[in-house]
Image (cartoon, rainbow, N blue to C red):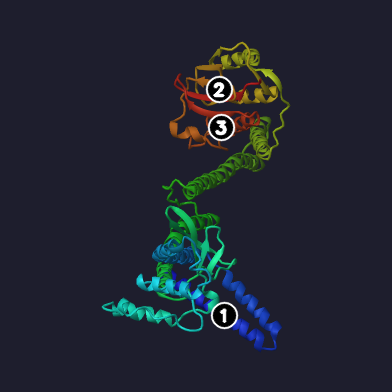
Amino acid sequence: MGIARFLHNFTVSSLGIIKYFCLLFLDPQVDTIKVYSYLFLKRSMVMKIHRKLFVILFGFSLLLVTALVLLIQWSIGRGMVEYVNTKEVEAMKPLVADLGLHYQKQNNWSEMQGQQRAFEQLVFLNFKKNNYMPGPPPFHLGRPPPPPENDFFEGGDNKIRNENRAREKNFPPVHQANYALLDARENLIVGHYRKDIKYSKTAVIVDNKNVGFLAIPKRNEITNGYELDFIEQQRSYLWIIALVIMMLVALLAQILARHLVGPIKKITQATHKLTQGDYEQSLDSQSNDELGELSRDVNELTLTLDQNNKARKRWLANISHELRTPVTILRGELEAMLDDVRPLNKKNIASANDEVKHLHFLINDLQQLTSADIGGIHCQKVNEDLSLWLNSAAHKYRSYLADAGITLELMIEPKQANIFADSIRLCQLFDNLINNCVKYAQAKRVKISLEIDRRPIQAMVIVKVEDDGVGVEKQHLPYLFEYLYRVENSRNRKTGGSGLGLSICAHIVAAHQGKICAAQSNLGGLAIIIELPLSK
């Protein structure tokens, strides 16, 4: 069906082009026709990719098969010419022996010198005896050569005699009779010897001595005879074979084009659905070629877009909830004081002020995250010894944790771990992590460890902040660094927090070309793992 459709479109396009050229020469309104013809040709040239691929494969195969057929035809023609020349040389060997006998009579060529008629008769009789008559016979002097002796045809094959007689009717003119006898120095003795014709020279040997040559003209082409019929028959067969091959090529090209374009169509449809917001789809990516890689990339893109879309929706829901809660409480308290439900005193005003502070802190965190997303986190980096920095900061954190009944363990293996960092941002990073341990982990023990991982490409400083608190279930770990993500579905603001602290930590680490992730701690709680590049 695909080939039939293509042939139909090709026929319609061809007829349209023929109609255009006919009108172009017959209709005086040439400009109007040019406009319509341009539009028609432009429309006909708009082809889908599988049709373009089919046309390319079919066109290239057509050129290749045509060139191959022409080359084979030329090879058959040249081979047949060489065969005829070789056959003629073989047929002339008895004549060479007869010429040797004529030489032996007087031990020279005086008997043949100038004897054109006798030489022609010898050549003709030689062909007759060997049942061979070349396409162009050897001579024609305006009258037929002398008839052969009667005993030559007695009891002979009538078919051979009739074939030879039919060939004798096509004798060429005298300028085509170019057989010649040459002496040992290749000087002409008798016959017609032309410098512009190539010859096959067969030596005449007498008593193991080369006494002359029989010059037989080489043919450049075949103009008649059974050889020509054979060549024409082979040419017809070759074109028939080429036609069959092209039909098979058309079928295979159509199948191959559909096979190659099929995955592309699926990818096109998938990307079109992505533009419409449909992320619930998956492409078959079992093949290992470029199309398979592209399908896998489209699947990854679909998954990423789906996750981002869900995160966006979750972000909008969470931010609306986080903003609505303090505003609702603040409005309720203010309305209660205005309606004299609650007295207007310092205590109630302080309660309302706490909600304003909470709202202020939430807006500040959101502003920091927004600035980080657009590249707004500015770091003034210098070479900083992280081992020394943690040892000095540990005194501040120990007292803060001790007030909450938490002990701090510090395990720093290297004496020096230089990184290119901003000390203010580092302080913000570890403050958030320690606050999480105090407010949400319900921990009794916090451990901070530092080590250096000597990797081949880039050595990394690895810092772990672990606790023995309630921990986080495994399914929540990948989402801890998302905006406003909290493990508690109740969104209790006393225990759940705003869900922005770890997101800010992730942006700070990313600004230092590092990585941060969450895992379950060996102490039983949560472990935050930070990787920062070691300065060289």
Disc 3 marks which residue?
A: 497
Q: Which residue type does callout 1 highlight?
A: Gly
Q: What residue is drawn where x is 66% and y is 83%?
A: 33
Name the secondary structure under disc 2.
loop
Q: What residue is drawn where x is 59% and y is 42%?
A: 319
Is 323 placed above or below 227 here? Answer: above
Residue 354: % across, % down: 64, 32
Spatial separation of the CA atoms under disc 1 and disc 2: 69 Å
Q: Which picture quadrant has residue 186?
A: bottom right
Q: Nearer the viewer, mark 1 or mark 2?
A: 1
Question: Which quadrant, please, contains the N terminus?
Answer: bottom left
Name the secondary structure under disc 3.
loop
Residue 261 showing in the rendered view: yes
Of residues 347 and 21, which is closer to you in this image?
Answer: 21
Packing grade of label 2 (10 A; few <14, some 14-19, many >=20) is few
Is 30 placed above or below 486 here? Answer: below
Q: Nearer the viewer, mark 3 or mark 1?
A: 1
Q: Decide which of tag 2 and tag 3 comes sooner along the chain.
A: 2
Of residues 39 and 271, which is closer to you in this image?
Answer: 39
Q: Which residue type does callout 3 highlight?
A: Gly
Residue 43: % across, % down: 59, 73
Residue 55 showing in the rendered view: no
Packing grade of label 3 (10 A; few <14, some 14-19, many >=20) is some
Query: In the rendering, which numbered label is found on residue 455?
Result: 2
Spatial separation of the CA atoms under disc 2 and disc 3: 37 Å
Disc 1 marks which residue?
A: 16
Q: Which residue type does callout 2 highlight?
A: Arg
Q: How many marks?
A: 3
Q: Nearer the viewer, mark 2 or mark 3?
A: 2
